[in-house]
Amino acid sequence: FPKFTDGRSYSTARLLRERYRYTGEIRALGDVLQDQLFYMRRCGIDAFALRADKDIEQALAGLRTFSDSYQAA
């Protein structure tokens, strides 16, 4: 994720999982923020490397903030 506003990696992860049946780890690196983790996980990203200035415990808690989606992924 070169910038948090660049959403191409969401699409790439989704294609890898669904179209190409990739079952290995997909890791998000770069400008990764807490509020993106829920959506990244929905797209098939299963490992995250947060920015150095972000707290990992707070980010993990953020994964539990949402339980349902109002829109299909």
Image (tube, rainbow, N blue to C red):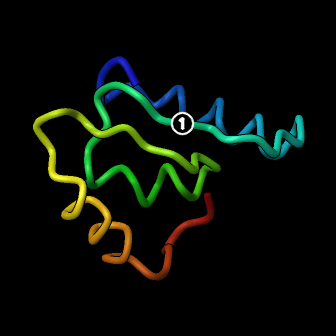
The vertical placement of 46 against 25, above or below, is below
Left or right: 26 in relation to 36? right
Residue 19 picture quarter: top right
Quarter of the rendering occupied by the N terminus: top left
The vertical placement of 29 against 32, above or below, is above
User: Percent position (x, y) of residue 11?
Assistant: 62, 34
User: Percent position (x, y) of residue 29?
Assistant: 41, 29
User: Percent position (x, y) of residue 26?
Assistant: 62, 38
Q: Residue at x 31, y 37 (%)?
A: 32
The vertical placement of 53 against 29, above or below, is below
Q: Crowding at label 1, few (<14), some or many (≥20) Cα neighbours within 10 Å? A: few
Point out the residue furthest to the top here. Answer: 2
Q: Residue at x 64, y 50 (%)?
A: 44
Point out the residue furthest to the bottom here. Answer: 67
Left or right: 67 in relation to 34? right
Asked whether 42 or 23 is in front, the reply is 23
Left or right: 44 in relation to 21? left
Left or right: 9 in relation to 50? right
Q: Residue at x 34, y 25 (%)?
A: 30
The secondary element bearing badge 1 is classed as: strand
**What residue is disc 1 on?**
27
Quarter of the rendering occupied by the C terminus: bottom right
The vertical placement of 28 against 67, above or below, is above
Q: Residue at x 57, y 50 (%)?
A: 46
User: Percent position (x, y) of residue 64?
Assistant: 36, 76
Q: Amino acid at mark 1?
A: Arg
Q: How many numbered discs, if any?
A: 1
